[in-house]
Image (cartoon, helix red, strand yellow):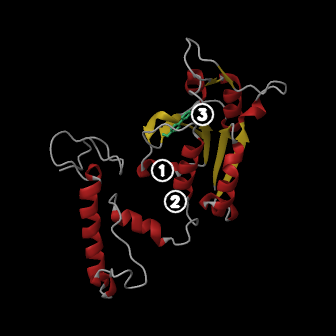
Amino acid sequence: MLRIDVVTIFPALFEPFARESMVGIAGQRGKADLRVHDLRDWTSYRHRTVDDAPYGGGPGMVLKPGPLVAAIEALAGEKGPDREARVILLSPQGQRLVQARVEVLAREAHLVLVCGRYEGVDQRVIDLAVDEEISIGDYVLSGGEVAAMALIEAVTRLLPGVLGNPESTEWESFRDGLLEGPQFTRPPEFRGRGVPEVLRSGDHGKVAGWRKAQAKARTRERRPDLLEPSEGRDPGNPATGREQGDGRCT
Ligand code: JAH
């Protein structure tokens, strides 16, 4: 069972997600427990203030440290070796989320996901209470909520017993960081366009070989960064999480 707590000033954003997505199924099956918390629950009743102007000036507002650290410590305990939860701030300043990291997170018992808003969070929250910052990509959102949902979806679908078809995760590792090739379903002809003959041949060996070749060609064409670098310094493979110069690059 993976427990996930989310801290946000927009808890209602998570309602349809918690109900309708993979995490809803995981919850029904007792594989995950998603709890969404309103940051304002850790503010004083009268003002409910979560943000303030940045020191030094500049546009926008910054999330105040008081309520955020109180929320995180209530859910995860104090930062340090005894903390059993992993506290993650969704932030463009974080390490980019890749599937290898998702696989590691899916083995945790308890994740606390902190969604920033506005111009960001007071740095002391990160220093005192956050274990790790994660980015889902190099673009700016208005807050971490959608990024948190992406992370939750990526993690929960890997939990044993969550996906309908347990073969599909094995299938993904068979593809090994390559893009998926083209897929077809019925009808066999649509607007004059057919289906590659090999897929209808019934020869499973030939189908597997064709798919692998299609996946490699498409990856080379569209995402050469996912393939081994051909020469020069080894920058690692961001899709697989292979480290720089870990010896697996020839
Ligand atoms: C933007 C707080 N990497 C995706 C991502 C995650 C969080 C944010 N933006 C992008 C964000 C503004 C305030 C978080």
Quarter-of-image position of residue 210: bottom left
Q: Quick one: which residue is furthest to the front in this view?
A: 191
Q: Quadrant of the N terminus?
A: bottom right
* Mark 2, other Cα within 10 Å: few <14 / some 14–19 / many ≥20: some
Q: Amino acid at mark 1?
A: Val
Secondary structure of the residue carrying tag 2 is: loop
Q: Under 8 Å from ligand 1: the CB of mark 3?
A: yes
Residue 19 falls left or right of residue 203: right
Residue 95 falls left or right of residue 199: right
60 shown above or below 95: above
Q: Quick one: which residue is furthest to the right in this view?
A: 46
> Rounded to the nearest whole Å, what is the CA distance between mark 1 and mark 2?
8 Å
* Mark 3, other Cα within 10 Å: few <14 / some 14–19 / many ≥20: many
Mark drawn on residue 77: none
Mark drawn on residue 102: 1
Q: Amino acid at mark 2?
A: Leu
Q: Residue 188: x and y, percent?
A: 38, 85
165 shown above or below 138: below
Q: Residue 70: x and y, percent?
A: 71, 28
Quarter-of-image position of residue 115: top right
Secondary structure of the residue carrying tag 3 is: loop
Q: Nearer the viewer, mark 2 or mark 3?
A: 3
Query: Which residue is label 2 attached to?
Result: 158
> Rounded to the nearest whole Å, what is the CA distance between mark 2 and mark 3?
26 Å
